[in-house]
Amino acid sequence: MTKSVLIGISGGVDSAVAAAILKERGYCVEGLYIRNGFPAGSEREAEVVASILGFPLHKLDTASSFRKDVVDYFVSDYLAGRTPNPCIVCNKKIKFRYLLEEAQKRGLGFIATGHYARIEYTEGRDGFQLFKGIDKGKDQSYFLFQLGQEELQHLIFPNGDRTKKEIQKMGLGLHLPPRKESQEICFIPDDNYRDFLEHYPVTLPRPGNIVDEKGNIVGRHRGTHSVTVGQRRGLNIASERPYYVLAIDIKKNEVIVGREEDQLAHGLIATNCSWIFPVPVGRGIMQVKTHIRYRHRGVDSEITFLPDNRGHVRFKIPQKAVTPGQAAVFYQGDCLTGGGWIERGLRDA
């Protein structure tokens, strides 16, 4: 029986080469281009990729879901004094959700994307496990921590055991249309999230005071949505030593700042935790390496499981800029065990 797969096609080299690899492996490949309601300018490139590689390209409009589940979440987090990560939410609620639904509708056995990550199956133990990609500089597993067994059992990451340079070289051989790799949020193409928020139909926080930890006023902010924890630049505070944002107090409409050493946190509280395979939530401790943001090198930690899908994380070495709203993702070696959303950093030892 021919193996069949529905792959998400963005128009870029990663998803195109992933599709080519699947065809080489003998899969019957079909593509899905997901429209999100924002002009990304990549639909034509996706069509060209499908034409070059010779597979049908389906299109799906997810604009309503994308705005509700991703954009509104993004805006509401900033208004609540948090720093959101929309790519993680999009992966769970848009990309993999609709890929899986469409594959099932079309009778296709697997789904795939061009992510740099790996999946392995351990029979009789933990089921499907998620690992970092071979290319540690391009690994994208951090953005996938919300995936579970339901998705992983149907999912293929063809690029996970190759480096970005290998993928780019393969792309040249396929004569794909040139496209600049984007590091920006897809619905904010100019990477100016403050301007995006200020043109979104919501009531923004008013300007207020920037204060130090003793309550002394040291400056003014243009709205709490305009700063993030850990920020140094753009605070416009006259001082011989730089200030950093330590916290955002929505109720008082204040931004609290301190010096570089004041940023250090000994741990964090994570909420809405999810796990790749079942863990004894509510009891016990797990030793992990915690990544508190993408590109973070990770820190040796221990998690104490708490009720209501929460976790108390204690770092072996204090970390700077533990930012509410960002993801704390947990690894054991290259294996991703799970993750959660940072509620707050813990500055007590």
Image: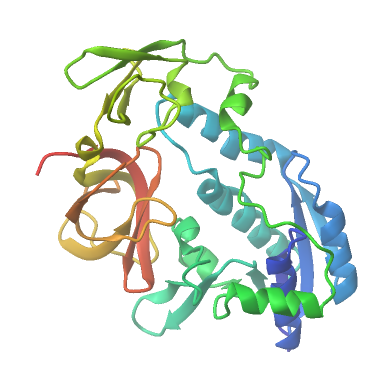
Q: Residue at x 61, y 25 (%)?
A: 195
Which quadrant is the C terminus positioned in?
top left
- Residue 233 falls in image quadrant: top left
The image shows residue 23 at horizontal and vertical percentages of 76, 82
What residue do we see at 42% from left, 25% from top? 80
Quarter of the rendering containing residue 106: bottom right
Q: From the viewer's perspective, tell me whether residue 143 is left or right of residue 332.
A: right
Look at the picture and state if 162 lies above or below 50: below
Q: Position of residue 58 (x, y in %)?
A: 82, 59
Q: Quadrant of the N terminus?
A: bottom right
Against 230, residue 134 (above or below) is: below
Task: Classify residue 68 by image quadrant.
Answer: top right
Camera-nearest residue between 307 and 335: 335
Q: Position of residue 64 (x, y in %)?
A: 70, 36
Q: Residue at x 73, y 67 (%)?
A: 13
Q: Is residue 256 visible?
A: yes
Spot occupied by residue 183 in the image (x, y as percentages of width and height): 61, 51
